[in-house]
Amino acid sequence: RDLLGNLTGAESWQTSGKREHAEGETEYKAAQAQGVAEGAKDQVSGYVSSVKGAITGDKTEQTRGNIQKETGKAQKEANKPA
């Protein structure tokens, strides 16, 4: 709408387009923050499982924990603000 408003000179379209753009940016940043938080949670939970598996000698739990920890780390990186 902003582009259409700029082309036609219609101020209402310009304002509407700018508002929609700002709302979209806010929504995108909120989704990024949620992704980082979920990644951090998985990373910590995976670390705990990995340590528990190492202490108890449960290699399967240790491996699953390591995988979850790395997955969480990757999710945090993927959602990190630019």
Image (cartoon, helix red, strand yellow):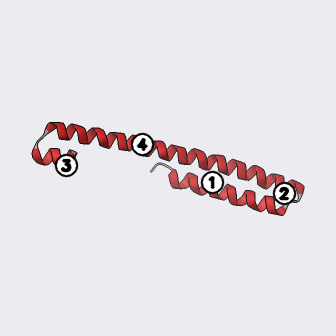
- The residue carrying mark 4 is 27
- The residue carrying mark 2 is 54
- Residue 3 is tagged as 3
Is 49 left, or right, of 81 in this rendering? right
**Mark 2 Cα-neighbour bin, 10 Å: few <14, some 14–19, many ≥20:** some
SS state under label 4: helix
Q: Nearer the viewer, mark 3 or mark 2?
A: 3
- At a point 72% along the width and 53% down the height, the residue shown is 46
- At a point 69% along the width and 60% down the height, the residue shown is 67
Q: CA distance from mark 1 to mark 2?
A: 19 Å
Q: Nearer the viewer, mark 1 or mark 4?
A: 4
Q: CA distance from mark 4 to mark 3?
A: 21 Å
Q: Mark 2 and mark 1 in contact (Cβ < 8 Å)?
A: no
Residue 20 x/y as whole percent: 30, 41
Q: Quadrant of residue 65?
A: bottom right
**Mark 1 Cα-neighbour bin, 10 Å: few <14, some 14–19, many ≥20:** many
SS state under label 3: helix
Is 49 left, or right, of 82 in this rendering? right
Q: Mark 2 and mark 4 in contact (Cβ < 8 Å)?
A: no
Name the N-terminal-most of marks 3 and 2: 3
Amino acid marked by disc 1: Gly
Q: Nearer the viewer, mark 4 or mark 2?
A: 4
- The residue carrying mark 1 is 72
Amino acid marked by disc 2: Ala
Q: Mark 2 and mark 3 in contact (Cβ < 8 Å)?
A: no
Amino acid marked by disc 3: Leu
- At a point 36% along the width and 44% down the height, the residue shown is 24
Residue 64 x/y as whole percent: 74, 60
Name the N-terminal-most of marks 1 and 3: 3
Name the N-terminal-most of marks 1 and 4: 4
